Every structure is written in structure tokens, then in C-alpha cells.
Image (spheres, grey):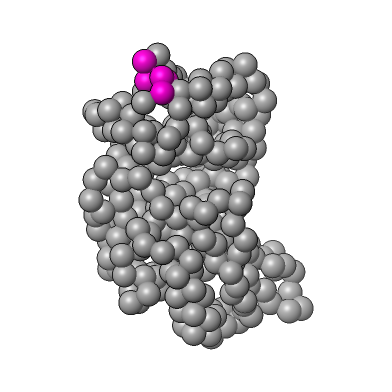
């Protein structure tokens, strides 16, 4: 039986490693769920790869498309016998803050199906300077642990449609929160023009619709988390515990005076 998850992760690591070692990737910072997976040994598998970029997102998108077409696709075909394609993706939620590169891989005549790996180039609000981390001898540019966690908080608050994987990541890496997280988030919210009414609506929804959200987190645990961790979570409260912990943290750092318009 083909292990699609294992093959997908191999391909993701090839993408990240190529970006980290080529001129087109200079200054790109690995962020998001795959950053947690690869650099922090997170138990949740990610379906996409995210990079922070301070410059022109569309120009960087074009550079990555050229790089992947020139270097990645031939290497994947040579090492793994997979055909592939690369193309510019559409803007998620009609946002101008993300430029997407759509990668896809397949093997004709097999039961592998089509493996799709979106590569998102986005722009985060950072309070700290980027840092470097290493994995298997490769140096990766990324953001600080505090900025990374705060980006998850802001994603939970700002996404039109909540991605429950963000709640799980917040639960798993809550220890990365800075002691100044309330002040840092207030500054970022001001830059993003994120008002207290938006924060209050999200917090209210998490509490009122707790049963629905807990069920959605359970689905993330079941579908995206490594079996040992999934078993430990599921037998100790699962989505309910994750949601309760994440909601409590969000309320502490954004509730009360923190939920007012900066």
C-alpha cells in the first residue's frame, strides 16, 4: 500500500531544502505548520509550506515557479519516479497578502493518486528579527518562536473561516509565548487594523459553538497527527481539551482590555 503521507513529507522536505539553499530562497523565512513539523519536531503533518517574505510577493512567486521547474521537478522524477507540475495558484480568500505556488506530483499507472503541495508566500507582522535554525546540516531562515506563535493567534482571530489546525498548533506550542505577548499582539493588531470587535466575535464563537469546534479539532487530530500523539490526545480529552486550553490562552492574551480596539 502506498504511504501518501510519507511521500508527501519527503517532497515537502525537498521543497524546503531547495528553497533554503538556492539564491531564489535568500531571505525567505520558513513559517507555518511545516516549520513546526520540520524544525520543532511537531507531531502534526502539514499539507502546505509557508514562507514569510518582506518584498514583492508576486515577484517572489515567479522566482519560485522558475526554481521548482528548473531544479525540483527533474530531481523528484530522478529520485522518486514521479512526474510533476508547477503553476501560480489563485489568491486564497481574494487576499493580496499571499501568493501561492501550486505543486503537484503523480505516478501514472499507480495507486498513488495526485499529491498537491501548495507553497504560500506571505507577509507576517514580526516583532523580532528573523533567526536561523538547522536541520540535517541545512540552514533555514525562520522567525522567532514568539513571532511564530503570535502568527497562529492572529490567524485564529483573522481568518474568515477558522482553520482548526491553528488551535491545535497553539495548544502544542503555547510554551513559546513571550512574556510580553499581550503588548506585542496589541502592536501587531494595530498595524493590521484588527479591532476588538473581531476579537470578541471569535472568542464568543469558540465558546458558544464549543462542541462543533471540538469535533473539528478531533478530525485534525485523527487525520493529521502522528499516531502516538493522536492516541495520547484522544484518550485524554481530545479536541475538547485542546479547544478549552487554546480558548483560555486566547482569552488571557486578547480578552478584557486586550480585546478593545488598539
Residue 41 in view (yes/no):
no
The x and y percentages for residue 171 are: 44, 32
Please tell me whether residue 76 is drawn above or below residue 226 in the rendered image: below
Q: Which residues are magenta?
A: 257-261
Residue at 62 percent of width and 77 percent of height: 84
The x and y percentages for residue 225 are: 54, 44
The x and y percentages for residue 228 are: 51, 41
Please tell me whether residue 147 is drawn above or below residue 67 in the rendered image: above
Does the magenta run of residues contain 50? no
Q: Nearer the viewer, residue 135 or 99?
A: 99
**Left or right: residue 146 compared with residue 114:** left
Residue at 64 percent of width and 20 percent of height: 209
**Left or right: residue 199 compared with residue 117:** left
Q: Nearer the viewer, residue 9 or 190?
A: 190
Q: Quadrant of the N terminus?
A: bottom right
The x and y percentages for residue 168 are: 50, 36
Figure quadrant of residue 227? top right
Residue 113 in view (yes/no):
yes
Residue at 48 percent of width and 25 percent of height: 199
**Left or right: residue 74 compared with residue 2:** left
Q: Main secondary structure of the magenta part?
A: helix
Query: Farthest residue in the right direction?
Result: 109
**Left or right: residue 193 compared with residue 228:** left
Amino acid at each position: 500500500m502506498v504511504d501518501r503521507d510519507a511521500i508527501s513529507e519527503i517532497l515537502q522536505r525537498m521543497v524546503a531544502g531547495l528553497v533554503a539553499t538556492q539564491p531564489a530562497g535568500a531571505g525567505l523565512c520558513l513559517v507555518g505548520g511545516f516549520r513546526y513539523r520540520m524544525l520543532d519536531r511537531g507531531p502534526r503533518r502539514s499539507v502546505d509550506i509557508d514562507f514569510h517574505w518582506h518584498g514583492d510577493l508576486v515577484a517572489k512567486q515567479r522566482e519560485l515557479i522558475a526554481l521548482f521547474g528548473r531544479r525540483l521537478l527533474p530531481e523528484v522524477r530522478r529520485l522518486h519516479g514521479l512526474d510533476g507540475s508547477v503553476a501560480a495558484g489563485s489568491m486564497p480568500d481574494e487576499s493580496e497578502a499571499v501568493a501561492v505556488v501550486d505543486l503537484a506530483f503523480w505516478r501514472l499507472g499507480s495507486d498513488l493518486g495526485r499529491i498537491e503541495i501548495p507553497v504560500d508566500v506571505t507577509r507576517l507582522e514580526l516583532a523580532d528579527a528573523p533567526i536561523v535554525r538547522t536541520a540535517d546540516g541545512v540552514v533555514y531562515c525562520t522567525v522567532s518562536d514568539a513571532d511564530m506563535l503570535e502568527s497562529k493567534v492572529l490567524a485564529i482571530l483573522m481568518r474568515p473561516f477558522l482553520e482548526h489546525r491553528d488551535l491545535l498548533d497553539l495548544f502544542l506550542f503555547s510554551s513559546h509565548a513571550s512574556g510580553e505577548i499581550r503588548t506585542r499582539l496589541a502592536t501587531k493588531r494595530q498595524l493590521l487594523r484588527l479591532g476588538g470587535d473581531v476579537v470578541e466575535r471569535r472568542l464568543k464563537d469558540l465558546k458558544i459553538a464549543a462542541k462543533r469546534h471540538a469535533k473539528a479539532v478531533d478530525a485534525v487530530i485523527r487525520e493529521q497527527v502522528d499516531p502516538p500523539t493522536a492516541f495520547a490526545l484522544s484518550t485524554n480529552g481530545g479536541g475538547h481539551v485542546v479547544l478549552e486550553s487554546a480558548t483560555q490562552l486566547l482569552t488571557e492574551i486578547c480578552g478584557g482590555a486586550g480585546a478593545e480596539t488598539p
